[in-house]
Amino acid sequence: MALATPDGVGAIGIIRVSGKNAFQICSTLFFRKSGLPVDISKLNSHSIHLGVLKENDLVLDEVLLSVFKGPNSYTSEDIVEFSCHGSRYIQQQLIQLLIRRGARLAEAGEFTFRAFFNQKLDLVQAEAVADLIASTSATSHQVAMQQMRGGFSSKIKILRENLVNFASLIELELDFSEEDVEFADRKDLKQLVLSIQKVIQRLVDSFELGNVIKNGIPVAIVGKPNAGKSTLLNVLLEEDRAIVSDIPGTTRDTIEDEMSIEGILFRFIDTAGIRQTSELIEQIGVSRTFEKIQKSSIVVYLFDVHELTKTGLNSEIQEIKEHLNENSQLVIVGNKIDREDLSYTEKEFASFKDILFISAKERRNIDALRKRFVDLFDSRTINVTETVVTNARHVQALQNASFALEKVYEGLNRNISGELISVDIKNALHHLGLITGEVTSEDLLSNIFSKFCIGK
Amino acid sequence: MALATPDGVGAIGIIRVSGKNAFQICSTLFFRKSGLPVDISKLNSHSIHLGVLKENDLVLDEVLLSVFKGPNSYTSEDIVEFSCHGSRYIQQQLIQLLIRRGARLAEAGEFTFRAFFNQKLDLVQAEAVADLIASTSATSHQVAMQQMRGGFSSKIKILRENLVNFASLIELELDFSEEDVEFADRKDLKQLVLSIQKVIQRLVDSFELGNVIKNGIPVAIVGKPNAGKSTLLNVLLEEDRAIVSDIPGTTRDTIEDEMSIEGILFRFIDTAGIRQTSELIEQIGVSRTFEKIQKSSIVVYLFDVHELTKTGLNSEIQEIKEHLNENSQLVIVGNKIDREDLSYTEKEFASFKDILFISAKERRNIDALRKRFVDLFDSRTINVTETVVTNARHVQALQNASFALEKVYEGLNRNISGELISVDIKNALHHLGLITGEVTSEDLLSNIFSKFCIGK
């Protein structure tokens, strides 16, 4: 039993009770408004009933009770949900009352774990439930939804089926090994392994995108002190997140926050200004900035159009480029066009392609900058409707399966015995099975479900 | 339409749609998992259905849909509730989708207002819903629950019925006024007015208790600097609320927080230490302390048993008593018994009755102090199962009704004409009607319901 709605005061709070004694326990405390007792097990599944919660003669609340009879419920067990007034006091009292009647508090993710245990969901789908709840952008939501509805699971299932067929052919050979028959054409087998590897590789490759979809595309904003980085961050995040002042070097920590633009999640990172400095704390800030550049998919180099000549800009960009990683993209942005006629500025920096001129302070051209981010993402995009892996655990398992399959392929090349090949195939099957939970361990499960919220 | 569960991330979020187009609007976006459309108006009331929310071909979420057909619903209108995954993103998207389909966001308290408008609840019951959600202790919860279930309303209804009878007798006289008949025995009438006045007075009197139940019994903790007031407050509140230090005069602001003891809500008030001081800020603190004493139901005078003799204690208590209001009670508490043998202390202060010796630091005798608070409350208690008025608006209306009835009584004494008496009776009826909402105004209603949370 657990509170299933967010903690806090609201119109409605829902307490969910699941398990084989749910109906019996809840029947001891739920009554019609007339005072008549109710045998919940006699009520129809998926029906709702108005009544009161009572202990002795004290009415705790007027509630709606929803009945779900297993296996037609989230957990596949009998479930009662009390929809009570959204007061913390009432929720706490009801939870205490249920405990006195023999229920116990659910652990984090326990309802979803039971759904998995009772084969309502596989492990990928269960993990997708948590991702779905945590998703904050259209793309991350869409990927989680697709996984919850079984998109990724069915891919893995097909891979496993192919491998099982493969394995059974090899096993058949082993049974007839004395006769030295080859049921499985070695060439066909190699072809099959290669095609499975190709699918796995595509899934593994999708993780870079998946990770970025789930956690946001890291965008570092860098530049000299007082170029307006914090102001730009605030404008992009549409709130006052960073402390802004005219004193160069105000931002020492790197500040991060996310924002969804056209359904894509970006994680913006403000950084300490890059300059030669003798002050220790600021030095640390600058070196941290270079680390951030390394890890970002998009690096915005922001400069004050009044402070730099084209020569100066050129040498700045060279320095940044040294720290850029191979996959990240540089966006050069000239700031503070509020203070001057734009035509001069454009002439001075005409030799640089793709410079975007903005005024963070006056919010000019910010939408163009946002659009630039979205375009950069689009150009690198795999179609999101394709299966995308967003979970490090899944990638790990896919890589392990791939590693086992490499051995299979090698074995086939070297014509080693079916017995040894069979071991590697089983190993690959094992790792694929870990993804969806056909194969599992207690550690793995507790690790996955403990990250859920209570009540899910 | 509004989110009915607390804002935030949880297992479940509920979006409620109420009104005559609710079924039609929701039917455009809710589908069976198979993709088949659903005509919600054809579903049974109080039934739950699994399905998906879809716009174009994009699945937003898998949800449970609950159907309530008016008038058997909270608002008395057709209601659809979507129980979706508790992600902010999903909730926002669903709300946007509903708006695109023609629904609009509900105002604060609008569902309850509609319940009132459709005569599901009277005004007292509607206000009790808000109190119920806000209640944080057993007694405040119980009073709100009793009001929501109609306890107070039925009292008012009986008063009104009595007055209506009274009025109709007077009116009858007016119809036959030329014949100079007295249908209503003046003595009986006076008796009736007196008995109604008595009931009203008891309700008005109950407000002191009601207010204290709802907002907590104010307990001021006073004493010399460094007597351990802040430490005691922290111990009572079971948290580190006040800044504690050994420097006398650390607490300058008065600090308040509430705590429920045995179901009764107490509001503890830490105060600046009382001493002669030349420092301005501290002087303000001391004078504020005397104000707090005036407003408290219980005043705890805390002293360090090592710092005061019985003579000193005596003069201190005299000073406090000068600031005490007539209804408040003084509790004398000797602190820091940790540092000495108790027998000496007890002997020194033997002449004072009811001193409680504690050690705030070592948490000794704190439960005894808590029990003292509860006992003091109990001794002043009206039985909570009796009707208690907790709402200043209700008291105001009762007092106005009482005032009108006084005029009726006077009129009867002075034998003035039935016409004039009738005006005052109607006035009394008007004020009683304001309480339950038989009489109402737009201002009053918007004032009441705007204090509700969105979604209720």
Image (cartoon, coloured by chain):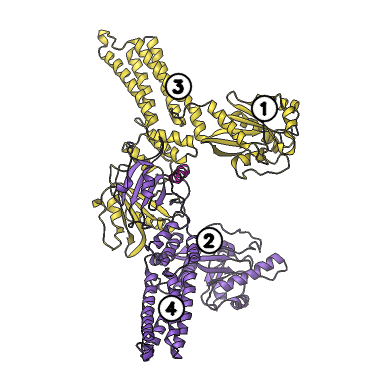
Chain colours: A yellow, B purple
Q: Secondary structure at mark 3?
A: helix
User: Mark on residue B235?
Assistant: 2
Image quadrant occupied by the C terminus of chain B:
bottom left
Q: Chain of mark 2?
A: B
Q: CA distance from mark 2 to mark 1?
A: 56 Å
- Dot 4 alpha-carbon crowd within 10 angstroms: few under 14, some 14 to 19, many 20 or more: some
The residues colored magenta run: B85-102
Whether marks 2 and 4 lie on the same chain: yes
Q: CA distance from mark 3 to mark 4?
A: 85 Å
Q: CA distance from mark 2 to mark 3?
A: 61 Å
Q: Position of residue B218 (x, y in %)?
A: 53, 69
Q: Is residue A5 above or below residue B221?
A: above
Viewer-nearest of discs 3 and 4: 4
Q: Is residue B344 above or below residue B24?
A: below
Amino acid carrying label 4: it is: Lys
Whether marks 1 and 3 lie on the same chain: yes
Q: Position of residue B182 (x, y in %)?
A: 36, 90
Q: Secondary structure at mark 1?
A: helix
- Compared across the picture, whether A383 is left or right of B319 comes to left
Q: CA distance from mark 4 to mark 1?
A: 84 Å
Q: Is residue A336 visible?
A: no
Q: Which residue position is annotated with label 4?
A: B426
Q: Which residue position is annotated with label 1?
A: A320
Amino acid carrying label 1: it is: Ile
Q: Is residue B382 magenta?
A: no
Residue beneath the point at 57% across and 40% down: A257
Q: Which residue position is annotated with label 3?
A: A201
